[in-house]
Amino acid sequence: SGSPGPYGRRCLDRPGEEGRIAKILANDLERALSRDDQLYLVYQPQINAIHDQVHGVEALLRWNHPVFGFIPPPLVIALAEDTAQIARLGHFILVEACTQRAAWKEQVGNDLVMSVNVTPRQILDPHFDRRVEAILTEAGLASKLLEVEITEATLLEPDAATLASLGQLRRIGVRVAIDDFGMGHTSLRYLREFPVDTVKIDRSLTQGGRRGVNDHIVRTIVALSQTMGFMTVVEGVEEAGQLARFLSLGCATFQGYLFSRPVSGEDCLRFIRNNARP
Ligand code: C2E
Ligand code: CA
Ligand code: CA
Ligand code: CA
């Protein structure tokens, strides 16, 4: 069950060596989930370049496998979705991120948002909203400080359960972001039909060629976002030239190596404090 992951067909169904390695990894993931040293989160700041402030941070999963080293996060997530381990892995990620944000309470601005990626299958869990609420309560974190990032693909054929789940999250005050936005042809339709808080402009628009066309798409996204009251975050900003270009297109908030790579919680806190305005 489940839709194919980013690696095409379900990892575990792949023939030969690839399928064999996928099965080994799925097994090892089970073990990694019961320990706490191989799986952890890193954090990447999102910067409002106009006010020179850190708007929020995105939590990103890392799995340092004892034999294979770092496993690409999309592969880890795809494996977990294929094996139903996503429930445990997703829970772990949300707990870690919320606990980290709560621990920063005294040290960062009281509106700094923690963004966490969630998968279609996680959202389809009919109790997802209640699970998130329980995690927030346990961590002692206000719901408005958590944002869940869903990819545009999650909303391609949104079923009633997905929409209900996301609607319920927003009602309790959790923010919703559309990730990797601008890739699908029918993107703009979703922006009108599905109310979100944040639109994350995909790296391919930041870094891609065909600048004239891309600039036009970005201008349209920004204009629509302003009308609808969504904030925009530009992903994958690596060069000062890209920053200047997107500032001139009306964007304010940026995420990318130009500012910081994803780093440990400790290093991220240092970054936030160094960048906060006195
Ligand atoms: P994403 O959600 O689009 O996350 C942003 C990815 O872009 C991250 O890769 C980040 O390290 C990378 N990145 C950030 N700034 C730059 C830049 O300036 N240049 C370039 N080239 N890349 C940049 P990462 O950490 O390898 O994650 C890849 C994808 O794996 C994520 O894409 C997301 O789809 C998935 N993922 C990662 N962590 C999680 C998680 O905790 N849960 C879920 N469900 N998915 C996750
Ligand atoms: Ca994301
Ligand atoms: Ca993204
Ligand atoms: Ca992505």
Image (cartoon, rainbow, N blue to C red):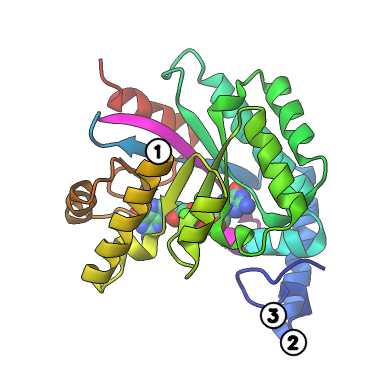
**Residue sitting at x 30%, y 23%:** 276
Please, what secondary structure does the residue beneath circle 1 have?
Answer: strand
Which residue position holds label 2? 16
Residue 262 appears in the figure = yes
**Disc nearest the viewer among 1 and 3:** 1
Residue 28, position as x, y percentages in the image: 76, 59
Please tell me in which quadrant of the rendered image residue 171 appears. Answer: top right
Which numbered tag is attached to residue 18?
A: 3
Which residue position holds label 1? 45
Please, what secondary structure does the residue beneath circle 2 have?
Answer: helix
Residue sitting at the far bottom: 16
Q: Mark 1 and 2 residues: CB-CB less than 8 Å, in contact? A: no
Q: Earlier in the sequence, mark 1 or mark 3?
A: 3
* Amino acid type, label 2: Gly
Q: Is residue 35 left or right of residue 211?
A: right
Q: Is residue 86 left or right of residue 273?
A: right
How dense is the environment of label 3, judged by Cα within 10 Å: few (below 14), some, or many (20 and up)?
few
Residue 72 higher or lower than 134, as above or below: below
Residue 98, position as x, y percentages in the image: 62, 29
Q: Which residues are magenta?
A: 52-74
Q: Tell me if the residue at label 1 has its CB under 8 Å from ligand 1.
A: no
Give the alpha-carbon distance from disc 1 to disc 2, as whole Å. Answer: 40 Å
Q: Mark 2 and 3 residues: CB-CB less than 8 Å, in contact? A: yes
Quarter in which the N terminus is drawn: bottom right
